[in-house]
């Protein structure tokens, strides 16, 4: 039986991390499943566990002029209820798992779990989110794509805690999200697509495109997005084949028990084209 | 009780279940009860060369083949499945031994230290491999658990004069029951007797399995059903195996032993619906009329025979669906493979057959450029027609009336025409299926095999006890059977007592399967109640005993499969409307309508529950319930990966019953439990076919399959 | 670790491994067998409890995370008027078949109705989307919740 700590406050949590290199557990909705054993027995953890889900310091949402800062232990449900959380993020969260999971699961947990199919990730990539990582006497901030390095892999150090997620305030006038799972609700993604854009004076002034569950990590390419900047509807229409084939080169899904390579890739590209043609161009007019 | 019997009453068990009072098997505790965990084969097919067992601490036990005092075979139609593997294993998950003891942590440790030495044998994983068979057979010489043929009329002659011959092949996949309560048993050895408590459909199947496994007289064995959290066929034959396990363990340890499956284990090791390949060759004449059909049904039976031969028979008897085809040849084979044994699941061979037949009818209509519905209607069975087995449809067949009703409810004709004009923006479609379910055991099984017995007992306090072995597994038997007895006796329903069956107390009224409980057992109870009513005043306590008698009209030859395959049929028609996402190929069900002939409904709301639950499970089977076995291992072995419908998946269902009465059912009731499942998949697949204008040839109809089919046809 | 919480209205504590599943603590230490285990991975909803009035899956919550929480299981909830309204509505609508999922659905309904006393069909379907039922096909449960919200007027 490993030790488990329930620190009274955030500073004590950092001390425990330094001294024990514990596994942080906020909601536990992923960890308790992956570590589970025979019913009646405690789940298996090789290292001590640190409960952080109750720490008020990392359960706040703070807003300033440029950023929205979301505490890592905020439950998904609490974010849906929060007035300042951007609608594009709420659309994604409202389709994550089930009400009972959203009551307990946290945004920080979904990020640290670092699943290629993590539902919150594509929109966070698209919104240029960064994560704040803290250990005793050190705080660092990293863009989310630098934080997640592979399936289940992050650069989180073993005495470090993810404390908050920073989302730059931006206003988009086009948003399109599609999660494709086996069932309309309550199922893991086969693939997902996130498109965000700002259209000004008939041209695209800002565009972000990301794909979930079709590569080792979420796919977002600023180089490809750059091609579409300052383009009109007609120009985009012409660029669709090129953009499509550029994304096709980086979309590298797998076959598994939920879907297959061919479907994941084909549908990802179809959603891309749908976004560009049907959503974006029709909006530009 | 006045008025129609069908008027719904409050279900007897609502309060205890809703309030969490009901005790399911995992909720039961006994003094000094031990836990058991199964060591399972990790190989699909191998010889066991040896097993290293670590030193076992005191109070812990290994229970294996050597602890089976009687015959190490689970009593089934064919006795081929051992309780514990002997020298070979035939599927991944096959039980080899149990580790039993008081502490779960220690049990896990012992399990991890046991080493099994396997010598691999070339396995068989698919129907195709089983048919070609380039390894030693798993079963018999031809590797078939069953190989049957039925013939009606003169198919060769008819094919010889055909204007057109069309061939189609259809495939159906696995389906897992996902009863919400996993399998579980507790065995107790006390005063030289064994008692087994558990979640089950058939207490006497379990008892008979224990008689054979223990090699004891029936008087030393008691089986008690605990409130059962769903079953759907999954707790028909499988519980016999694990009842044996806990019984042998209890005898060895001298203490109560509990074996409760976790979900993963339940999905990996228990039975599933048989995957099938069904090939239909159909001969049409110049008038676009079917004159003959040749049907080849192949099923994956898994590693042991189980109920495969009867599942296969049901599929074969349904080989022409609800259509009158004069010349028929049906061949059916259930193959042995090194997959987990297939078994009973709601519909029992019917869903596979009806999917293939309904889609084939649709394809034939397309082929001869006729409207699929008109094509079906012109071939529809009528009263007096002969079935595949030459039986006569003696009771009313109201398919035309039912079809009219469902067409009206769903506005099918108008929608079908509108949706057939394909425009690419919104892909909508509508489909209709026609189907039946043969009520109760096939042929004269009720008379020759089951021989049901029931008892009714009036107690001194005026209450009446129903003494039968049938269980309520959610389908409402506790309520419907009480209603029947109460009405016949003219007493309040609350004065009728019907406890979970205990084989020490109840006679063998047969298993709770084959949609037979109300029609067969309910009818016997009705007759018993009539007799009890006549003798009510004779003594303070009166007991009546009734034994099943076959209705005089039934003729059946089990050797040649000739005659009445079922005592009677229940009928159904189902319409499903869908929308297919043009980008992702995802299917959204937009409307569901059904009309059913189940005879008299004993309780309309309970029937509605059977209809809605059956359709939902059937639509899951048709769409999202993907289960594949790779190298003998089930890939979707959790509820996360094996997806069943949730509350967001389907819209409301509109269903109606038509008036109908069966003389040999209680108050005119026939069967209802399995029927509604059967029509869902073909209705859905037809709707998708209408939406996309592609031929659907397999279920589940996944977006992956639709995308590939659409790409293939472009 | 000693863990304190409010269980069905009473202050209780348990000395146990804080990583133990709340489900096991409720069933084994407190004998609350109305909380079921159907999957053990937060998918089926048979282990649903209310934590601070909101539904949660007790099979994936370590009991240590529930320290100082207010937990309600069906055993506590069934003593309330609201429960009675739901039970009657479930009986009327035919929402109960095998019953293994039913306590979970009742608690999911409570969690919904306390936020929205007159929910529409979509809200009901969404609220119970994390509770699986294999018997009913859901419509009759949705109907039961609708009836409870109408007949239990004033209770929520």
Image (tube, coloured by chain):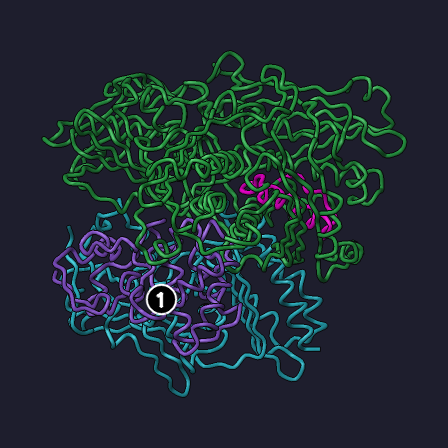
Chain colours: A cyan, B green, C purple
Instruction: Answer whether residue B518 is visible to the viewer in this image.
Output: yes
Q: Position of residue C130 (x, y in %)?
A: 43, 59
Q: Residue at x 63, y 50 (%)?
A: B657
Q: Residue at x 49, y 69 (%)?
A: C123
Instruction: Say whether residue B694 is magenta.
Output: yes
Left or right: residue B248 versus residue B591 is left
Instruction: Say whether residue A204 is magenta.
Output: no
Q: Position of residue B579 (x, y in %)?
A: 66, 57
Q: Residue at x 43, y 36 (%)?
A: B532
In this view, the residue farthest toward the top is: B141
Left or right: residue B29 versus residue B239 is left
Q: Nearer the viewer, residue B302 or B423?
A: B302
Can you tell which quarter of the image residue B186 is in? Answer: top left
Q: Position of residue B61 (x, y in %)?
A: 17, 29
Magenta range: B669-698
In this view, the residue farthest toward the left is: B58
In this view, the residue farthest toward the bottom is: A65
Q: Position of residue C61 (x, y in %)?
A: 28, 59
Q: Which residue is mark 1?
A: C83
């Amino acid at each position: 039986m490993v030790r488990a700590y329930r620190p009274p406050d955030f500073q004590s949590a950092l001390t425990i991390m330094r001294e024990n290199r514990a596994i942080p557990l906020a909601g536990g909705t992923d960890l308790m499943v992956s570590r589970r054993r025979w019913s009646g027995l405690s789940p298996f953890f090789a290292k001590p566990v640190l409960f952080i889900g109750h720490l008020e310091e990392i359960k706040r949402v703070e807003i300033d002029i440029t950023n929205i800062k979301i505490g890592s232990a905020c439950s998904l449900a609490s974010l849906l209820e929060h007035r300042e959380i951007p609608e594009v993020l709420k659309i994604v969260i409202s389709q994550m798992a089930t009400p009972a999971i959203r009551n307990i699961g946290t945004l920080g947990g979904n990020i640290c779990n670092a699943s290629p199919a993590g539902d919150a990730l594509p929109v966070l990539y698209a919104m240029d989110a960064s994560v704040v990582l803290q250990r005793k006497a050190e705080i660092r901030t990293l863009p989310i794509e630098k934080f997640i390095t592979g399936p289940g892999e992050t650069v989180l150090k073993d005495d470090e805690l993810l404390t908050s997620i920073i989302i730059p305030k931006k206003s988009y006038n086009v948003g399109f999200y599609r999660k494709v799972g086996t069932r309309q609700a309550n199922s893991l993604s086969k693939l997902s697509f996130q498109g965000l854009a700002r259209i000004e004076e008939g041209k695209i002034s800002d565009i972000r495109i990301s794909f979930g569950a079709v590569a080792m990590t979420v796919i977002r390419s600023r180089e490809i997005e750059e091609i579409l900047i300052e383009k009109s509807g007609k120009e985009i229409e012409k660029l669709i084949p090129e953009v499509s084939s550029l994304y096709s080169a980086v979309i590298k899904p797998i076959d598994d028990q939920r879907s297959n390579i061919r479907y994941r890739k084909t549908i990802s590209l179809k959603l891309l084209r749908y976004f560009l043609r049907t959503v974006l161009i029709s909006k530009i007019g | 009780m006045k008025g129609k019997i069908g008027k719904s009453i409050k279900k007897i068990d609502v309060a205890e279940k809703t309030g969490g009072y009901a005790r399911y098997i995992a909720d039961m505790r006994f003094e000094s009860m031990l836990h058991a965990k199964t060591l399972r084969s990790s190989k699909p097919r191998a010889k066991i060369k040896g097993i290293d067992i670590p030193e076992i601490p005191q109070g812990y036990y290994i229970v294996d083949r050597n602890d089976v005092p009687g015959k190490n075979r689970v009593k089934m139609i064919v006795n081929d499945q051992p309780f514990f593997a002997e020298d070979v294993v035939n599927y991944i998950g096959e039980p080899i031994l149990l580790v039993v003891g008081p502490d779960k942590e220690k049990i896990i440790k012992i399990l991890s230290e046991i080493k099994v030495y396997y010598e691999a044998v070339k396995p068989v994983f698919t129907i195709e491999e089983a048919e070609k068979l380039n390894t030693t057979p798993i079963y018999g010489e031809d590797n078939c658990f069953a190989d049957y043929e039925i013939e009606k009329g003169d198919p060769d002659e008819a094919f010889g004069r055909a204007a057109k011959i069309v061939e189609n092949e259809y495939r159906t996949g696995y389906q897992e029951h996902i009863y919400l309560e996993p399998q579980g048993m507790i065995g107790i050895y006390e005063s030289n007797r064994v008692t087994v408590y558990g979640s089950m459909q058939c207490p006497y199947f379990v008892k008979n399995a224990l008689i054979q496994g223990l090699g004891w007289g029936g008087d030393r064995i008691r089986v008690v059903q605990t409130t059962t959290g769903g079953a759907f066929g999954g707790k028909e034959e499988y519980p016999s195996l694990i009842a044996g396990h806990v019984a042998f363990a209890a005898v060895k340890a001298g203490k109560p032993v509990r074996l409760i499956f976790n979900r993963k284990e339940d999905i990996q090791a228990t039975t599933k619906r048989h995957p099938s390949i069904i090939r239909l060759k159909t001969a049409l004449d110049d008038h676009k009329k079917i004159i003959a059909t040749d049907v080849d049904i192949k099923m994956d039976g898994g590693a042991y025979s189980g109920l495969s031969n009867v599942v296969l028979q049901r599929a074969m008897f349904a080989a022409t669906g609800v259509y009158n085809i004069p010349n028929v040849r049906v061949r059916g084979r259930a193959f042995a493979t090194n997959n987990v044994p297939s078994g009973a699941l709601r519909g029992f061979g019917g869903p596979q057959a009806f999917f293939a037949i309904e889609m084939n009818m649709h394809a034939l209509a397309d082929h001869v450029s006729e409207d699929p519905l008109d094509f079906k209607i012109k071939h529809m069975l009528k009263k007096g027609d002969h079935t595949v087995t030459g039986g006569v449809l003696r009771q009313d067949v109201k398919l035309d009336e039912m079809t009219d009703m469902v067409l009206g409810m769903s506005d099918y004709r108008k929608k079908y025409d509108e949706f057939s004009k394909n425009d690419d923006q919104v892909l909508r479609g509508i489909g209709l299926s026609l189907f039946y379910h043969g009520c109760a055991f096939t042929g004269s099984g009720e008379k020759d095999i089951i021989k049901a017995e029931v008892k009714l007992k009036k107690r001194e306090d005026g209450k009446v006890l129903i003494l039968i072995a049938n269980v309520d597994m959610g389908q409402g038997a506790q309520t419907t059977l009480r209603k029947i007895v109460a009405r016949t006796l003219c007493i309040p329903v609350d004065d009728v007592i019907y406890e979970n069956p205990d084989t020490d107390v109840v006679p063998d009224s047969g298993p709770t399967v084959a949609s037979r409980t109300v029609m067969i057992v309910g009818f016997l109870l009705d007759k018993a109640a009539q007799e009890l009513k006549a003798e009510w005043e004779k003594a303070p306590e009166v007991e009546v005993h009734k034994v099943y008698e076959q209705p005089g009209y039934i003729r059946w030859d089990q050797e040649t499969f000739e005659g009445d395959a079922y005592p009677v049929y229940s009928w159904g028609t189902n319409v499903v409307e869908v929308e297919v996402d043009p980008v992702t190929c995802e299917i959204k069900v937009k409307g569901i309508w059904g009309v059913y002939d189940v005879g008299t409904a004993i309780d309309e709301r309970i029937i509605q529950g059977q209809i809605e639950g059956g359709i939902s499970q059937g639509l899951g089977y048709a769409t999202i319930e993907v289960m594949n076995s790779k190298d003998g291992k089930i890939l979707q072995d959790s509820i996360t990966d094996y997806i069943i419908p949730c509350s967001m998946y389907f819209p409301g269902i509109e269903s109606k019953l038509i008036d109908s009465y069966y003389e040999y059912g209680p108050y005119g009731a026939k069967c209802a439990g399995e029927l509604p499942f059967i029509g869902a998949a073909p209705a859905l697949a037809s709707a998708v076919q209408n939406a996309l204008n592609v031929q659907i040839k397999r279920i589940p109809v996944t977006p992956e399959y639709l995308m590939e089919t659409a790409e293939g046809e472009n | 670790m000693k863990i304190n919480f409010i269980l069905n209205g009473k202050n209780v504590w348990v000395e146990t491994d804080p990583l133990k599943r709340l489900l096991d603590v409720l069933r084994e230490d407190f004998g609350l067998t109305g909380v079921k285990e159907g999957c053990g991975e937060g998918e089926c909803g048979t282990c649903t409890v209310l934590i601070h009035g909101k539904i949660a899956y007790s099979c994936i919550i370590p009991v240590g995370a529930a320290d100082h929480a207010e937990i309600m299981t069906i055993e506590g909830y069934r003593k309330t008027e609201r429960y009675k309204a739901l039970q009657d509505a479930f009986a009327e609508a035919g929402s109960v078949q095998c019953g293994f999922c039913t306590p979970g659905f009742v608690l999911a309904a409570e969690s919904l109705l306390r936020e929205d006393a007159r929910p529409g069909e979509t809200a009901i379907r969404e609220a119970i989307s994390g509770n699986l039922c294999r018997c009913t096909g859901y419509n009759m449960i949705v109907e039961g919740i609708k009836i409870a919200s109408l007949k239990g007027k004033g209770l929520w």
